Amino acid sequence: MFEAIDQIFVALKHWVVGQFPAAWQPLGSVFLSIIPILAVFPLLFAITTIVERKTLGRIQNRLGPNRVGPFGLLQPVADGLKSLTKEDIVPYAADQVVHFLAPIALIVPVLLAFSVLPVGRNMVPIDLDAGLLFFFAVGAGSELAVFMAGWSSRNKYSLLGAMRAIAQMVSYELPLILSSVTVVMLVGSLSTVKIVEAQGEAYGWLLKWHVFTPWGLAGFLLFMIAAAAESNRTPFDIPEGESEIIAGYLVEYSGFKFALFFLGEYLGLFAVSSLAITLFLGGWHAPFSFLEWIPSYLWFFGKLSAFIMLFIWLRGTLPRLRMDQLMNLAWKFMLPMCLINIVVAAMWHFTAHWQFVGAVLCRWLLCGAAIGVPYLWLGDALFGEKKLAKRTYRFAD
Amino acid sequence: MLPLHYYLIVSAALFAIGLAGALTRRNAIIALIGIELMLNAANLNFIAFWRYGSRPEALTGVMFVIFSIGVAAAEAAVGLALIIAIYRHYKTTNLDEIDSLKG
Amino acid sequence: MVTTFVILTIVTLVSAIAAMSLRNLVHCALCLVLTFAGLAAFYLQLNAQFVGFAQILVYVGAVAILIVFAMLLTRNVDSTRQAILSPSWGVGIVGALLVFGAIVLSILCSTMVHRPALSETQVTVLAIGEQLMTNYVLPLEVIALLLTAAMIGAVIIALHEPTSESSAVQNPRLEPSVPSVPNPAQVPRTDHP
């Protein structure tokens, strides 16, 4: 019974593909894998925009959009219609072709990235042997799209924003990849499906999610910081900082192209959050073995919603970083911590055969010390001198 | 499967394009791009020969290309750093004007 | 199979020619990205999945970005006025055509043209990893050393030279020299590169 509900979408797809003539079945199967991606994630984007505006409104002690539909819930529809009907302005001096291609070059790689993410049991569009590498490879394409947008607009704010964005994305791609390397080391595969499967076994009632190990916890935190920076979310949103360079590389975009950029950015956030779930939070597995009866896709999308809420919360809470703070954090703190974390993951692997009483506690203490001591030392060395004090204003008093 | 020489001819054409660019363009960055293209043409040859070779399970071609990509990345980084340093000095990236050895 | 090959060939070669011949440097770089992507598709067609993705990750994600950054940092003040080809461009073109002719001739004359492709081998990432850690561990270490050295070298080469005010007293050798041929056209433009 529960199994049938869990596999309902897979069974539905098999049934629909079976209705096609035999020659068309492979093509039909491909289309039925693509269409859900194109339907579900943009819909999630529409829901996220309204939830984000509502939540930010509550955080800032105001109501948020409440005019269109009941409680303002139809606001995304109105926004979509507005961006579709708005005039598409292309600057006179802009490089027309590149300016047109940039939003497409952003949205296509992001959608491609979803094709290796398992959203449920047996629910992955393609199970590539090098799936994780594929994800990062297509992610590299979006950096170029940002550059195309910024350069082709012929606007100094656009170009500055694009340079900032690329510098940030290149710097944070390193911690992002290095923190997922630990998972690849311990699982022994780059396939996202295998990584999720490896987290399915249970100790007693607790599942073996990677985040329940010292290296997994550290890797997860590092991955999430890098993910926030990769998707240009606060506190790492200086490429688009409205108060400094108006909107960065988006300045000269209007109408539907702007909406595409917006969509691409949110889809990128969903993709990288989904990857975090896949790598560290057990993918579509339940945390406890007695909860496995809840359908796998509900677990996945539940975790994804939690991530989206976390990012909205961060956006409402944290101030923006400065450019030098951003680079210092990436190169002097995140990168060494990621390298240390790889060593810690190896320690965890090589102490796996310890059998005596309290072995797990011993391993935790050992690995926790190996990651915690450098953390404290590095944090003290980098940020220790700057004691918090009452701020003095030189000119305002 | 297509015959092997299709891939080899594509690779030769790519090599010739890269060579022509590296020899004729005045801009140092474009010349570097030409060199990258020639390197990539060689990589395509390695993969094609590996795929059509007698022992594909030995992975020789794949390994060579992986190392070659690594070397190319290092080459691009150092080459572009050199171009930027030269630009600071001479205020140009035109290869024909950078012709003095006196520094 | 043949259709895919023809499309990939056209995309790769046309974008390579464009990358070598366009006047606007950034357009050249964007066409170069298309060439790299086409090559990655060739690798995928030849069952070298790992290499194809690594090609995209390294070339599109890193090398192309580096090239674009270098182009923006070295904007050419005279790019629209002067010829883009060097004076001896004819020799270069003829030389490249000769090389192409020689390679094609030798390919067509060799016996390996008739070599058949072997069975469909799917190379797994696991096999590549095992080979890297056993047979090829020394090259792997060397390449790691090379990349570190290249990174340090690139940073040192591209470091800012001290400006004339700060360095003129201590070290006159490091003063940035003036261009050898003073040229009124070399005043930096204020508009977009």
Image (cartoon, helix red, strand yellow):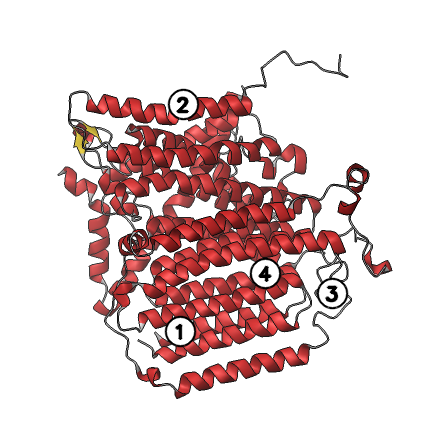
Residue B91 coordinates in the image, percent (x, y): 75, 55
Q: Tell me the distance, in whole angstroms, between the alpha carbons under discs 1 and 3.
A: 43 Å
Label 2 vs label 4, nearer the camera: 2
Residue B70 coordinates in the image, percent (x, y): 45, 55
Image quadrant in which the C terminus of chain C is located = bottom right
Q: Which residue is nearer to you in this view: C74 or A158?
A: C74
Q: Which mark is residue A62?
A: none
In the picture, residue A101 is in which quadrant?
bottom right
Residue that appears at 50% across and 34% down: A68
Q: Tell me the distance, in whole angstroms, between the alpha carbons under discs 3 and 2.
A: 54 Å
Q: Tell me the distance, in whole angstroms, between the alpha carbons under discs 1 and 2.
A: 55 Å
Helix, strand or loop under label 2: helix
Q: Which mark is residue C29?
A: 4
Q: Do we see residue A137 in this rendering?
A: no
Q: Tell me the distance, in whole angstroms, between the alpha carbons under discs 4 and 3.
A: 26 Å
Residue position marked by numbered label 2 in the rendering:
A373
Question: Residue C190 vs residue A134: left or right?
Answer: right
Judging from the image, mark 2 belongs to the subunit labelled A
Residue position marked by numbered label 3 in the rendering:
B99
Helix, strand or loop under label 4: helix
